Image: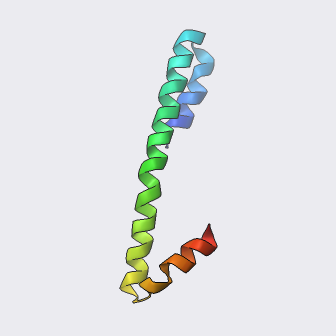
Amino acid sequence: MFTSPFLMISTISVSKSVGFIILITAFFMEGLGNALLSGSDDALFYEAIRFEGKEELFGKIRGNSQ
């Protein structure tokens, strides 16, 4: 997720055909990063509230944040 914006910006200085391939790669990398992040943040949050003994509130807290 950190690298994909820099790849997108780099398309300014290359030809259209190479820029298109770079954009495809950047969007793929960003999608993969979002997919990996979406599960791990929930797991870390659940472990934090479980440590405090409040795991029954997980659904309510996540529902309110969504």
Q: Is residue 19 visible?
A: yes
Quarter of the image with the C terminus in it: bottom right
Horizontal side of residue 20 vs 35, given as left or right? right
Q: How many marks?
A: 0
- Residue at 47% across / 56% down in the picture? 38
x and y, in percent, of residue 41 in the image: 45, 63
x and y, in percent, of residue 35 in the image: 45, 48
Which is nearer the eye, 17 or 56?
56
Q: Is residue 15 visible?
A: no
Query: Which color scheme did the rendering employ for the protein?
Result: rainbow
Q: Is residue 66 above or below residue 15?
A: below
- Residue at 52% across / 13% down in the picture? 18
Which is nearer the eye, 62 or 34?
62
- Residue at 55% across / 72% down in the picture? 62
- Residue at 50% across / 18% down in the picture? 21
x and y, in percent, of residue 25 in the image: 47, 27
Which is nearer the eye, 61 or 11?
61
x and y, in percent, of residue 58 in the image: 48, 78
Taking the view exactly as shown, the residue that stands out farthest to the bottom is: 53
Q: Is residue 19 above or below residue 24?
A: above
